[in-house]
Image: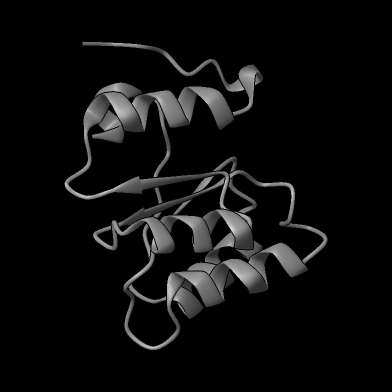
């Protein structure tokens, strides 16, 4: 979906929260999308770690999760997610979140 919304986006993926944290430290991305239901450490725990790091805490972080109950969403927002998108992901909702939180200098382009 992201490649469709912004063909110039550079996307990195990680299979676990631990791998994602390491990758974020290495790459210093403009935005992070975190699943909540990950093997081992979950997305909430990863968010707490990421937000505790001076070099990463400023990065917009968006939860993407099938956990769609109001208490799940509130927990995510309370812990510091900038947005919480529920699955199945609606392209318009993803686009709105990316446009809102992606640094303007990156020139996110709207398509379709």
x, y percent for residue 4: 23, 26
Rendered-image quadrant of the N terminus: top left
Figure check: 103 above or below 33: above
Callout count: 0
Rendered-image quadrant of the C terminus: top left
Residue at x-position 41% and y-position 31%:
9
Residue at the left extreme of this rendering: 88
In the visual, does 101 lie left or right of 87?
A: right
x, y percent for residue 7: 32, 24
Q: How is the image coloured?
A: one colour
Residue at x-position 43% and y-position 78%:
42
Which quarter of the picture shows residue 73? bottom left
In the visual, does 101 lie left or right of 38?
A: right
Figure check: 7 above or below 81: above
In the visual, does 88 lie left or right of 6?
A: left
Residue at x-position 45% and y-position 70%:
43
In the visual, does 55 lie left or right of 30?
A: right
Residue at the right extreme of this rendering: 54
Which quarter of the picture shows residue 25? bottom right
Figure check: 2 above or below 70: above
Say if residue 52 shows up in the picture: yes
Residue at x-position 31% and y-position 59%:
69
């Amino acid at each position: 979906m992201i490649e469709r919304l912004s063909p110039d986006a550079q996307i990195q993926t990680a299979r676990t929260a631990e791998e994602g944290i390491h990758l974020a430290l290495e790459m210093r991305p403009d935005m992070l999308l975190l699943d909540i239901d990950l093997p081992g450490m979950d997305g909430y725990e990863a968010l707490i770690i990421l937000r505790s790091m001076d070099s990463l805490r400023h990065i917009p972080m968006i939860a993407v999760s099938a956990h769609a109950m109001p208490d799940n969403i509130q927990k995510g927002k309370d812990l510091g997610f900038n947005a919480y998108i529920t699955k199945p992901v609606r392209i318009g909702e993803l686009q709105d979140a990316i446009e809102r939180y992606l640094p303007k200098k990156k020139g996110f382009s709207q398509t379709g």
